[in-house]
Amino acid sequence: MPTRSTQSSSKKTGSYKKWLSVLIGLAALAFALITGEVPEELQAILRDDPLGRANTTIESVPEAKRLLLNEIYYDQDTTFYCGSTFTPDKTVSHKKSGYIPVDKKEKRAYRLEWEHIVPAYVLGKSDPAWRDGDPACVDRNNRPFKGRQCAEIASEEFQYMEADMYNLVPAIGEVNGLRSNYSYAMIPGEKRAFGACNMEIEDRKAEPPDNRYGDIARTYMYMDDVYPGHGIISNKNAKLFEAWNTLDPVDAWECERARRIEAAQGNENHIVKAACREANLWPVR
């Protein structure tokens, strides 16, 4: 495993940007305290500084999973797509949901996993470490490697994107595996491969239950806005997410979840928060 001194320039750049964001925020606070207002020039910098609105505290997916289970979903026990229940030891039951495993012998059908709504591949495919590798990414036999494992080591920005709790939801392991990194789409017909669960996965596309349309759309909008330059929302699916956002408005749990993550992660999901305020669900009671 490479030492910290071998980390790539992309990681150093990420640290620089993070501290620059902190300094900009402190400058804005100082001006506000002294003058009672923030100069327009500084307001413009703050508006154009996406890093200040993104995750800069949770550095790894294991850390995010621990917080999600213990601090966000501590009183929730329902999986995102299918409504199966789960216990703190990550065991999943389908008694209430009517979910039928595709493979009844598959252990992942009874195991809780945390799924990236925006797949890790979409987040990392444009990252230099993922695409080309990095000097820090060398295995025990001195062979270079690239891809997700390299990005997790060498790219601080990818680490923060991958661990952003707004983008992680509890899912049946089997569904998480079958969805893979497929994009969301409307799939003709109502093929029910999972029993009562209205989750469809076909031809490298996934269509969630309609009561999850908005949650997914708003997650994509948030991730695309605070992590620009990664092609998270393409021209092809922009209209789909706009429609899903309208068809499935925020509910009380989506707002409460956003409030809890904001408290634990330190940044707001401005997309969800604005929708919750419009629906008179924020501040969360």
Image (cartoon, rainbow, N blue to C red):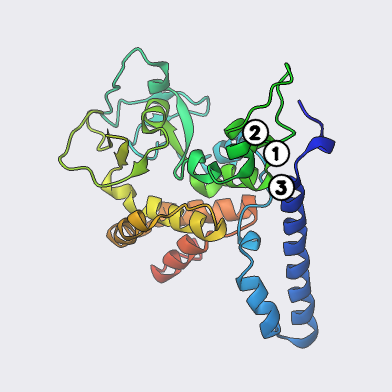
Quadrant of image for the N terminus: top right
Kind of residue sitting beneath label 2: Cys
Secondary structure beneath dot 3 equals helix
Q: CA distance from mark 3 to mark 1?
A: 7 Å
Residue ID for mark 2: 150
Q: Is residue 72 above or below residue 179?
A: below
Secondary structure beneath dot 2 equals helix
In the image, 70 versus 224, the foreground residue is 224
Q: Is residue 215 above or below residue 204?
A: below
The mark tally for this picture is 3
Q: CA distance from mark 2 to mark 1?
A: 6 Å
Q: Position of residue 281 (x, y in %)?
A: 43, 64
Q: Position of residue 123 (x, y in %)?
A: 53, 45
Q: As drawn, which residue projects farthest toward the left?
A: 189
Callouts 2 and 1 close, C-beta under 8 Å: yes
Image quarter for residue 246? bottom left
Q: Residues within 10 Å of mark 3 (few under 14, many from 20)?
A: some
The disc label shown at residue 10, or none? 3
Q: As drawn, which residue projects farthest toward the top?
A: 105
In the image, 270 versus 136, the foreground residue is 136
Secondary structure beneath dot 1 equals helix
